[in-house]
Image: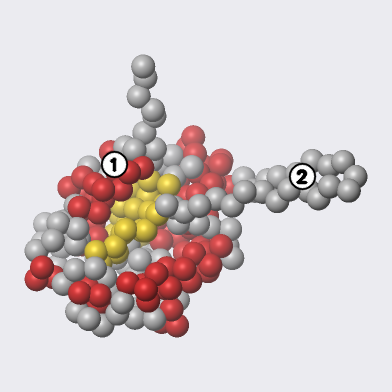
């Protein structure tokens, strides 16, 4: 029996990559999408990539924010992306304090390996994007193709971390990814086709399409 084909993903850091950089984003009101982020993620969606967010959220471990507030922030992220016809398929976060010694806080690889198992991903054919070298390190360690974007955190020493590519924004990073994927490029440019609802018999209402659940 053949094993199911592995999917490909683009792993994204949140603050400084998708959203405006803040040391701690502690409320939905402080969450703002960066220009071009919505269209970039939409192009990756259309190309067939899963888009997965991996974010360190030590504000929870520091007692500065609750998990409920973090969920509200992510709900706003989903709503804002939907305005561009874009979506995030999964969100993984580390709530721990840096001193806790957990295996999920970036640059550790706990979140990326968990996602790879749960989504049946080919990490060697996936990408990891972030605005800090600690965002790039997990992807590099897991064998993914890495991109550093200069849209968030101030420049810092590389300490031996060498991304495969550097870009000014997530939008530019998405363009670079698709330039390397000629078989997927045409999908990213294709308009999303609206599903037609088949006419029903008289006195029956047309059934609404089932809602897709995010994992």
Q: Where is residue 160 in the image (x, y as percent from the top left)?
A: 11, 57
Label 2 neighbour load within 10 Å: few <14, some 14-19, many 20+:
few
Horizontal placement of 112 versus 84: left or right? left
Q: Where is residue 169 in the image (x, y as percent from the top left)?
A: 40, 64
Horizontal placement of 169 versus 54: left or right? right
Q: Mark 1 points at which residue?
A: 117
User: Residue drawn at (17%, 47%), measured in percent from left and top?
Assistant: 141
Name the image colouring.
secondary structure
Q: Position of residue 138 (x, y in %)?
A: 20, 53
Q: Mark 2 points at which residue?
A: 197
Nearest the eye: 146 or 61: 61
Pick out the residue farthest to the top.
1
Q: Which label number is shown at residue 97?
A: none
Q: Earlier in the sequence, mark 2 or mark 1?
A: 1
Considering the numbered disc 2 on the image, is that residue within a helix, a strand or a loop? loop
Pick out the residue farthest to the right.
202
Q: Distance between the residues labelled 2 and 1?
A: 36 Å
User: Residue drawn at (37%, 58%), measured in percent from left and top?
Assistant: 91
Q: Position of residue 104 (x, y in %)?
A: 19, 58
> Does 92 appear above or below 16?
above
User: Residue drawn at (39%, 81%), measured in percent from left and top?
Assistant: 27
Q: Is residue 175 visible?
A: no
Label 1 neighbour load within 10 Å: few <14, some 14-19, many 20+:
few
User: Residue drawn at (38%, 46%), measured in percent from left and top?
Assistant: 9
Nearest the eye: 66 or 15: 66
> Does 63 appear above or below 16?
below
């Amino acid at each position: 029996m053949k094993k199911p084909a592995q999917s490909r993903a683009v792993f994204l850091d949140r603050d400084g990559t998708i959203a405006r950089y803040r040391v701690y984003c502690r409320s939905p009101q402080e969450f703002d999408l960066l220009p071009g982020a919505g269209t970039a993620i939409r192009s990756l969606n259309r190309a067939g990539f899963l888009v997965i967010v991996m974010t360190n959220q030590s504000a929870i471990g520091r007692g500065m924010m609750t998990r409920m507030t973090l969920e509200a922030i992510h709900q706003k992220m989903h709503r804002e992306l939907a305005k561009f016809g874009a979506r995030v398929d999964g969100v993984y976060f580390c709530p721990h304090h840096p001193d806790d010694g957990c295996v999920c806080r970036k640059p550790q690889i706990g979140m990326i390996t968990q996602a790879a198992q749960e989504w049946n991903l080919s990490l060697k054919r996936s990408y990891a994007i972030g605005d800090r070298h600690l965002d790039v390190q997990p992807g590099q360690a897991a064998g993914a193709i890495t991109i550093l974007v200069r849209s968030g955190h101030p420049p810092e020493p590389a300490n031996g971390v060498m991304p495969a590519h550097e870009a000014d924004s997530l939008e530019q990073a998405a363009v670079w990814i698709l330039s390397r994927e000629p078989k997927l490029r045409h999908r990213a440019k294709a308009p999303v086709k609206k599903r037609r609802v088949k006419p029903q018999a008289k006195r029956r209402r047309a059934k609404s399409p089932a809602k897709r659940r995010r994992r």
